[in-house]
Image (cartoon, coloured by chain):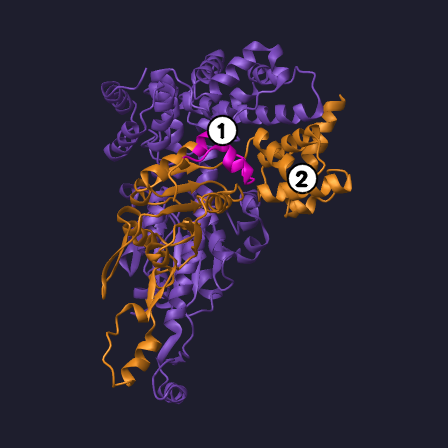
Amino acid sequence: MNNQDITLKDLSEKGYFTHQSLVDVVNAAKYLNKPLLVEGPAGTGKTFLAKTLSDLLSLDLIRLQCHEGIDEDKAVYEWNYKKQLLSIQDKSDKKNLFSEEYLIKRPLLQALTSEADNLLLIDEIDRADEEFEALLLEILAENQITIPEMGTIKGNENKIIILTSNNTRELSDALRRRCIYLYLDFPTIEIEKKVLMNSVEKITSDEATKYASLIAYIRNLNLNKIPSLIESVEWVKYNIFNKGNTNENLGILLKDKSDQKIYLESIEKLNESNNK
Amino acid sequence: MSLTTSELVKFTDFCKKNKFYIPVESLETFLKFKIQKDFDSLQQNINYLYYLIPKDREDQNTLRTLIHKYFQIEIENVSSSTFQIIDEYRQNQALLDILENINSGGIEELNRISIDLITNDIDADFSRPVSDLYWLNQIKKTKKYKEILSIFDNFDMSTFSQLTNELNKNNFERLLDNSILEKIRVERNKQKSAYKPSELEPKNQLNETDFLFTNQDERKLLLEQTYQLGNKLAVKYKRYVREFSKGKLFFRKTIRKSLASGGVLQNIIFKPRIRQKPKLTIICDISGSMALNSLFGVTLLYGMVTKFASIRAYVFIDGITDISKHLRHIKKNEIETIFSRWSEFVKSDGHSDYQKSFEELIESDTSEKGTLIVIGDARNNYRNISENLIINLSNKYKKIFWINPEQKKYWNTGDSQMKKFQEINFKTSEVRNYKQLKSFIKELDFKKVLTS
């Protein structure tokens, strides 16, 4: 892994538009070799940040998607007990049943023992149970995993760890302490504009500003589900292609009937006050 | 100029005085980084101090304000909720100053405006026994408040600037309201004779703040988390039910399956348990004495009910109403509308009646040996609770958990009938804030209940 700092330009070449402070934090995490905890609402590009980084630094992306009830067997390792059972039957050779041959490596162990440089993405850690967090502490702080039957496996120092969280519950202090914290909010109007300019064909600068401020306005309404970055880009893409009214095709942006109603009402109100 | 270590120590002390504690660990990380990187400008140093120390969003905001106060250095704030400065604002220097001040973490301007607003209304008697929100609404009605917000209106601007302007206005209003509320609290605490519900003093930690004393933004956040807790409780329950329904080893089938792998027991098969699956019922008091706590209660119900169809949820005042179906059809932000239909839940006089409600519950709930979770303060308006009911309840349910939003020291005072319910196999907990709710759910062990 090269030790050079990432710049804003590198990221934007890969299609990730952001601000200098994010780049600084990422560089600090990389330099200090500490995991990066990225928190923020859904759809702000947390996972995409990890993907972009792995692409930029040419690292293998190993992804662990957390969910309710995830445990050691699914995240770290599991013994292949069927193979072990069959091996007991075979009396001719006396093998050690608890050797690497019978070990099924799950993402965490895989990332730890992999020879190649890699980026470990632990996605939506807030969905996992609190007990699972404790399981992560060892790998986050000491870069090692203990398997009772085999002993401690020490990892190579050739990886970046990124944890993402939608902030649906408070993460424990123990986990936070071991990470560098980064809060990723919805993009500001300027950044949204850059994203639109980059990913939508034939969009003028004026249109981009217009759409960016409209989307920022929509996100500030009291909605059930705030539109994500991808949704807003798709919506603008289609509107530019279709040259349609912004009030049509709302289904691309707002995926809830009451949300659409809220939006239409507020736009109407705004127009009314404008005409006065 | 670079940041010296002695300066850093001074700053740490300054933070400590302002009740913000910088952990030694983070400081160490920062120093390590600083030595290796060798920054030359103070700004850069401060930037990294800001990046490396905070561990959550709240910390970030506090630290930004403190840095602004101590070093007079502005940290670039890139959150989308900050104000977007548009060209049209250049006509109005005063507005521009305010917005830029807030953007850079300053709170002086907001403080100035909100104190101005509060002192403007001299007649306000803060000792009156009403909530802080009442005073906020009074202030919002004044001419002066409207005047302040109208600084956003006097611009002649293009359509998309107008959108941004509207956005800024909304943000500003929210920030201003919070600031005013804070000032009102300070003002009310100053007056000794003022109405003070016990422990009015807001705690530092949001999750230790009473549900009753949260402001709108905090409540929104807590309600969202409460909803998640509801989901979590439901999942926790389901997982144990699944485990519970696994019966004894199905020997014959297991052996037969193993023949395919040469007698190795690869797949182990269990007999399903025939017994009725345990049911979970959750019931929440929404009478007046529960106040805001019932909003959190219903949100918890909502979180559970929307996760699994088999969970039954009831609300009650002086009779129960099955609300599970209704809850499944509404959206998360519509939960409060339930309280606007309050009169529909009143069966007779609108004062909570635990005797009657539980009788109805026992009658309508057909499941047997289930688990019951009660959210309520057990204030029965001096009505009697019969021995018979208690016996019936304990026969009907295997285990009853009771969440009481009152402080423990007030239980069994006045018309609270907590003692009667505590006598039998009840697990009672005081839940007045998010932290307690979380630990209640964490400690709730279905496994013990279901297998005992």
Which percent across, then down, holds residue B101? Answer: 47, 17
Residue at the image point whose x is 62% and y is 32% from the top: A193
Which percent across, then down, holds residue B297? Answer: 44, 48
Q: Is residue B174 above or below residue A139?
A: above
Front in this rendered view, residue A23 or B238: A23
Front in this rendered view, residue B74 or B154: B74
Q: Is residue A125 above or below residue A240?
A: below
Residue B355 is one of the magenta-drawn residues: no
Give the label, 2 or 1, closer to the camera: 2
Can residue B236 be seen from the camera position used here?
yes
Q: Is residue B189 above or below residue A193?
A: above
Picture quadrant where residue B73 is located: top left
Amino acid at the residue labelled 2: Val
Residue named by callout 1: B78
Residue named by callout 2: A200
Front in this rendered view, residue B85 or B194: B85
Residue A16 is one of the magenta-drawn residues: yes
Can residue B353 be seen from the camera position used here?
no
Q: Which chain is purple?
A: B
Give the residues drawn in magenta, as a range. A5-23
Picture quadrant where residue A236 is located: top right
Q: Which quadrant of the figure contains the N terminus of chain A?
A: top left
Q: Chain of mark 2?
A: A
Picture quadrant where residue B3 is located: top left
Q: Which chain is orange?
A: A
